[in-house]
Image (spheres, grey):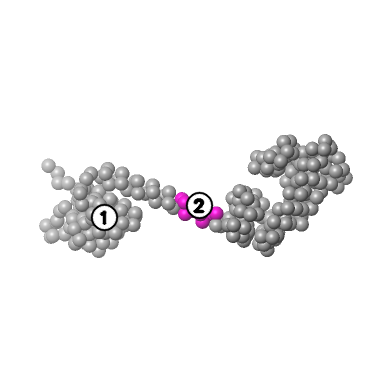
Amino acid sequence: MDEPRTLTVGAVARLAGVTVRTLHHYDEIDLLHPTGRSEAGYRRYTEDDLERLQQILFYRELEFGLDQIKDAMADGGDAIVHLRRQHRLLQERIERLRRISDAVALAMEAQQMKIKLTAEERLEVFGPFDPDKYAAEAKKQWGDTDAYRESARRSAEYSKDDWLRIKAEGELATQRLAAAMTAGLPAGSAEAMDAAEAHRRQIDAAFYACSYEMHAGLAEIYLADPRFSATYEAIVPGLAQYVHDAIVANAARHKG
């Protein structure tokens, strides 16, 4: 009958990516004893030894100390028991790291937007809307534009009072559009286009140089993006379309 294949300590060290001294230490502390010895007395490792070493290295990756690993493996048990435990611990670690990653991503987004307000001030200014949530998206779409860079520069300088004023000015511009609509005025009427012009100027004054072409592009987003359209629809049903049409009409008026 053939003898089971065994490996030298050097071969195992190379295979596992550890040092020979590490394997010697595991032997000395009764964590991993090689099953066999050569005629000259050198350590020889079997397949079962390699399997145990794999479990030890998995626990090390999970940041277990050597004493903890010894305790975890003291009761023996087959490999599947250890693998199930390690898989569960890894899943918990992955979930913890995911939460940390999400928190870091949000912090990066906040820095990109540079909205320097306390949590209380943010709630007072923005209510349930969180501008940080859209910072990464905005950077992805417009990060290379002068408008984005100018908006980020200005936003970095605004205080809570500045944001409250900007918010009030934006709401006033929207209210003018809503009033024109509820009065039954066509989106192409002078009153509706003047309200659209006030809307454009508010963006221009607060964030970036908003050309008529850029304003018309924003109008398409207001209509197509459900997050924007829902905001307008909550004020007056049909307002998203009306705002779009008034902005487009105003852009055409000034282009003509």
Amino acid of disc 2:
Asp
Amino acid of disc 1:
Ile
Q: Regarding mark 1 in the picture, which secondary structure is present there?
A: helix
Residue 209 quadrant: bottom right
Residues at badges 2 and 1 in contact (C-beta under 8 Å)?
Answer: no
- What's the magenta region? 98-106
Q: Is residue 230 above or below residue 129?
A: above
- Name the one closer to the observer, 1 or 105: 105
Q: Which one is earlier in the sequence, the residue at label 2 or at label 1? A: 1
The prevailing secondary structure element of the residues shown in magenta is helix
Q: Which mark, by number, is residue 69?
A: 1
Quadrant of the rendering where the N terminus is positioned: top left
- Residue at 26%, 59% in the rendered image: 66
Q: Which mark, by number, is residue 102?
A: 2
Using the numbered discs, state the Cα–Cα distance from disc 2 to disc 1 in whole angstroms.
Answer: 31 Å
Using a 10 Å C-alpha cutoff, classify the residue at mark 1 as few (fewer than 14 neighbours), some (14 to 19) or many (20 or more).
some
* x and y, in percent, of residue 146 in the image: 71, 57
* x and y, in percent, of residue 223 in the image: 71, 40
